[in-house]
Image: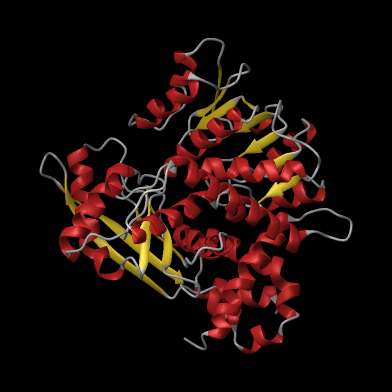
Amino acid sequence: MNVDLIMNDLVKKHPGEVEYHQAVREVLESIEDVYNANPQFESAAIIERIIEPDRIYTFKVPWEDDQGKVHVNLGYRIQFNNAIGPYKGGLRFHPSVNLSILKFLGFEQIFKNSLTTLAMGGAKGGSDFNPKGKSNSEIMRFCQSFMLELWRVIGPSTDVPAGDIGVGAREIGFLFGMYKKLARENTGVLTGKGINWGGSLIRPEATGFGVVYFTQEMLATKGETLKGKTIAVSGFGNVAWGGVKKATELGAKVVTLSGPDGYIYDKQGISGPKIDYMLELRATNEDIVKPYAYEFEGIEFIQGKHPWEVKCDIALPCATQNELNADDAKKLIENGCMCVCEAANMPCTPDAIEILLEHKILFAPGKAANAGGVATSGLEMSQNSMKLNWPKEEVDHRLHEIMKNIHSACVLNGKDKNGYINYMKGANIAGFMKVANAMLDQGLI
């Protein structure tokens, strides 16, 4: 396999899709040696087949606002690979949504889902619709219009969407209601459902919980624990909330949250009612973190910056792609940070990752560290199939075990002869090998 040659061809076919190109290159560079050691992959053109989605659906979504004005957004569903199970991946409603971002997310989802060891393929979808500032009625009308197109290509054994940025329990409820009416069946076709109608306990917290469990395993390789560690977190949504909640429970102190407007520094630590307030903050229609500084005493608000300049032991980027760059990585290292665990999808730039690996910092990619969300979605699918609900302790135990197993797979495939664990390499190899071998077993399809 010649990575540069493959990437040149991919860029020619899909110009301008920079996030997608970045995600593909990262995986190809990590798996190059193991791929070349298995000539059967080359003869079956596994790489050429796995980097292209099985199919892409694009559709218009007309909807009417409360004043009777008609708007038109674009909707997408990218079914990337189903070698090991039904397509599985979230729906994102955000103005930034475009084909490149969804293809990068769908490609990452293949390997993330593979790492969970659950039978789930990779997919992603969404729309450039912005739910911020919209009424419940407007969001319902949009979701119903979106599902009018989507319902034909999804199903509990075909493609199971979930939530993502801009798509929470409210949106999943509206989408599921319309699907149920159109398909005339009540099945586990969507995950992230309300607990009263098929949802799983701890699903909203699951991604954040999983990130902290993974961080705990990473620290253990150095004889360290979370107790007494200072953590910098970006974002303030569900992932950050779950991460803050679990990290605090395990004895760490989280001192930052961030939004598009800047970040807050809480040197006393975010705990108790402050964690509860994160939910109130998230429920507002304004995507800003500054109100936290007004709600509690002794809080600094730093406008227009990311929190990576704060002295910390651990950094958990929970916001969005490419939010932590090379300069940020240098600041973290200078301030004594020992661990960076990606809680969002691809939040570190390639240059930042290179610096972290060069300095032998504990670094985990999102496809491994933030797999707890989709893992719990997989557990929700299992509960739906069996027509039962597990208690919170059961779901949390299974999630914890899955994250420990993902960590073990990364160590097995990423540990070098000097003992340093390249988690990015380990995650990519472990995720790829399972999918590649499944593709070989199933022939040219």
User: In the figure, is residue 70 to the left or right of 348?
Assistant: left
User: In the figure, is residue 136 to the left or right of 41?
Assistant: left
Q: Residue furthest top?
A: 297
Whole-percent x, y for residue 226 in the image: 69, 33
Q: Residue at x 60, y 77 (%)?
A: 436
Q: Residue at x 56, y 78 (%)?
A: 438
Q: Residue at x 24, y 57 (%)?
A: 146
Asked whether the viewer can see residue 61, the reply is no
User: In the figure, is residue 230 to the left or right of 186?
Assistant: right
Whole-percent x, y for residue 372 in the image: 53, 49
* Image quadrant containing the N terminus: bottom right
Asked whether the viewer can see residue 377, the reply is yes
Count of labels shown? 0
Q: Above or below — where is 168 with respect to 48?
A: above
Q: Residue furthest left?
A: 68
Q: Quadrant of residue 299?
A: top right
Whole-percent x, y for residue 336 in the image: 78, 32
The type of colouring in the image is: secondary structure
Q: Quadrant of residue 252?
A: top right
> Is 308 or 162 nearer to us in this picture?
162
Q: Residue at x 65, y 30 (%)?
A: 231
Q: Quadrant of residue 36?
A: bottom right
Q: Above or below — where is 316 with respect to 104?
A: above
Whole-percent x, y for residue 99 in the image: 42, 62
